[in-house]
Image (spheres, grey):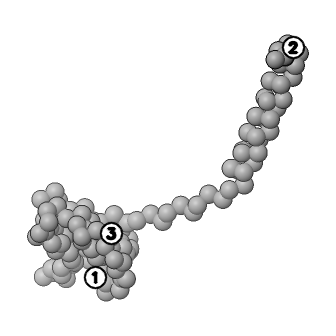
C-alpha cells in the first residue's frame, strides 16, 4: 500500500473543497430560482365575543346569506364539521370557511354559531358551542 504524499493530499482536499463550493453554489441557484408560494389570504377574525360565550358587540348591517360549502369526508370519526359563517371586519362582511374540529368527547355534537337580529334591527354573533 502506498501512502499519498503531502502534495497529493493537499490536491485531493483542494478538489474536494472546490467540489463542495460548486455544489453549494448550485444549491443556492436552485433555491433562488424557486418560486415562493403565494401568501395565504388573511382570514377575518370573528367579532370579539366575551369569554363566557355571550353574544358579540352589535353590528348594524345584516349578514349576507350563508355560502354553500362542499363538505369533504371527515379525516376521522372524532372530527365534526363546523360550518363557515360571515364575520364582520369592522367595515364589511368576510366569509370564514368551515373546517373540521376534534370532538372534546365522543358523544359531543357541534351547535353552530349564528347571527341573531336584535329588536332594534342590529345583529349580534352568538358563538357556536359543543353540546
How many numbered dots are placed on residues in this image? 3
- Earlier in the chain: of badge 3 and badge 1, it is 1
Q: Which of 34 and 114 is in front in this view?
A: 34
Q: Judge from the rendering whether residue 94 lies leftward or rightward of residue 54; answer left or right.
A: right
What residue is pinned by disc 2?
5
Q: Which of 29 and 67 is in front in this view?
A: 29
Q: Judge from the rendering whether residue 60 lies leftward or rightward of residue 95; answer left or right.
A: left
Q: What element carries label 1?
A: loop
**Contact (CB < 8 A) between labels 2 and 3?**
no
- Specify the quadrant of the image occupied by residue 70: bottom left
Task: Tell me if residue 108 can be seen.
Answer: yes
Q: Which residue is drawn at 87% across and 22% down?
A: 11
- Earlier in the chain: of badge 2 and badge 3, it is 2
Q: Which residue is drawn at 87% across and 14% down?
A: 5
Placement of the C terminus among the 4 image quadrants: bottom left
Q: Which residue is drawn at 28% across and 68% down?
A: 76
x and y percentages locating residue 112 in the rendered image = 20, 75
Query: Which circle, 3 or 1, is nearer the viewer?
Result: 3
> Rounded to the nearest whole Å, what is the CA distance between mark 3 and mark 1?
34 Å
> Rounded to the nearest whole Å, what is the CA distance between mark 2 and mark 3?
63 Å
What residue is pinned by disc 3?
75
What residue is pinned by disc 1?
62
x and y percentages locating residue 16 in the rendered image = 79, 30
Label 3: how many residues lie within 10 Å, few (<14), some (14-19) or many (20+)?
few
**Contact (CB < 8 A) between labels 1 and 2?**
no
Against 23, residue 125 (above or below) is below
Q: Which residue ends up furthest to the top in the rendered image?
A: 6
Label 1: how many residues lie within 10 Å, few (<14), some (14-19) or many (20+)?
some
Q: Which of 131 and 12 is in front in this view?
A: 12
x and y percentages locating residue 19 in the rendered image = 80, 35
Label 2: how many residues lie within 10 Å, few (<14), some (14-19) or many (20+)?
few
Amino acid at each position: 500500500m502506498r501512502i499519498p504524499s503531502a502534495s497529493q493530499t493537499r490536491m485531493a482536499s483542494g478538489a474536494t473543497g472546490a467540489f463542495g463550493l460548486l455544489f453549494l453554489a448550485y444549491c443556492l441557484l436552485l433555491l433562488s430560482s424557486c418560486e415562493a408560494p403565494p401568501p395565504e389570504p388573511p382570514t377575518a377574525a370573528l367579532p370579539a365575543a366575551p369569554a363566557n360565550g355571550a353574544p358579540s358587540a352589535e353590528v348594524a348591517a345584516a349578514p349576507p346569506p350563508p355560502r354553500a360549502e362542499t363538505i369533504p369526508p371527515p379525516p376521522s370519526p372524532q372530527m365534526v364539521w363546523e360550518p363557515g359563517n360571515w364575520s364582520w371586519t369592522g367595515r364589511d362582511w368576510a366569509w370564514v370557511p368551515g373546517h373540521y374540529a376534534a370532538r372534546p368527547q365522543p358523544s359531543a355534537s357541534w351547535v353552530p354559531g349564528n347571527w341573531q337580529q336584535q329588536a332594534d334591527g342590529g345583529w349580534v354573533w352568538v358563538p357556536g358551542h359543543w353540546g
